[in-house]
Amino acid sequence: MRVVGPAITDSSLAAPTLSRQRERASYGRVMSEFFIPPWTIRTGRLVLTPVGFQDFEDLCLLKGDPLVYATMLGGVRSRVQVAAEMAEDAQFWAANGVGMWLVRDLEGKADGLTGLHERSDGRGVALRFAFRPETRGRGLAREAAGAALRFAHDRAHVRRVIAVAGEDNLPSRTVLGSIGMRQTDTFTRGGRLMLIYSSVA
């Protein structure tokens, strides 16, 4: 018995129509969203991905910039320090199911960092964030840090998260208050009064 397949016509070889192209684009967007890894966070304006060695150059630019990282615990990092911290971040992710994210805009530009880490001074698991100065004043730190905090509580089941900000660091204090963290303690570091914020699930 001869099997007759579908006829091949000029129209079947033609370029997809505009409606067909739109259908395919829509399908692609749906599938890309469906296969987002569970540790990747998307907000209205940002994409947060766990830091990895593919991000090394972006991390060096962020952590090596005094305008971004001078006020962070440990200060500005060298390239060697960035590489060492990346290894520590990977270990923290593996052990805790949460860690540091690189924050990019929807076009892929690295705007900053946020996430959780174990503080070297033994005060506990802390939320941190650092953004390029040109991105400030737009609510991006609040958007990213809030998403990281929700992930920590809701998905990684971290019960208590702290954050530390200098008394004179009003922008960071504003972000922490806006995402629901409350000041619970203080300490002095290098003659500077530091405020401890907490969030308990």
Image (spheres, rainbow, N blue to C red):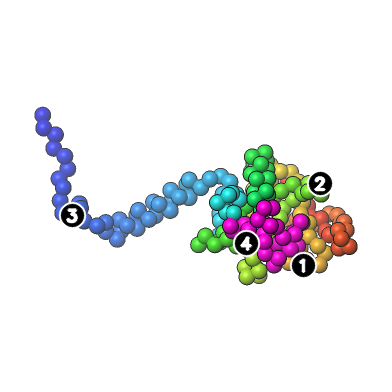
Residue 20 is at least partly visible in this image: yes
- Judged by depth in the image, the label closer to the viewer, 3 or 2, is 2
Q: Would you name the residue on which mark 4 appears?
A: 61
Foreground pick, 164 / 155? 164
Cα distance in 3D space between marks 4 and 1: 24 Å
Foreground pick, 132 / 86? 86
Q: Would you name the residue on which mark 2 appears?
A: 122
User: Is label 2 in a helix, a strand or a loop?
Assistant: loop
Q: Residue furthest left?
A: 1
Crowd around label 2: few <14 · some 14–19 · many ≥20 (10 Å): few
Residue at the location (48% across, 50% down)? 33
Hey, what amino acid is under mark 1?
Leu
Cα distance in 3D space between marks 4 and 3: 52 Å
Percent from the top left, x then y, of residue 110? Answer: 58, 60
Q: Earlier in the sequence, mark 4 or mark 3?
A: 3
Percent from the top left, x then y, of residue 38? Answer: 56, 44
**C-beta proximity under 8 Å, tags 4 and 2:** no
Q: Would you name the residue on which mark 1 appears?
A: 170
Q: Would you name the residue on which mark 3 appears?
A: 11
Residue at the location (67% across, 53% down)? 80
Crowd around label 4: few <14 · some 14–19 · many ≥20 (10 Å): some
- Judged by depth in the image, the label closer to the viewer, 4 or 2, is 4
Cα distance in 3D space between marks 3 and 2: 69 Å
> What is the quadrant of residue 158 in the picture?
top right
Foreground pick, 53 / 185? 53
Q: Earlier in the sequence, mark 2 or mark 1?
A: 2
Cα distance in 3D space between marks 2 and 1: 24 Å
User: Is label 4 in a helix, a strand or a loop?
Assistant: helix
Q: Earlier in the sequence, mark 4 or mark 1?
A: 4
For the record, the magenta segment spans 57-81
Q: Residue furthest top?
A: 1
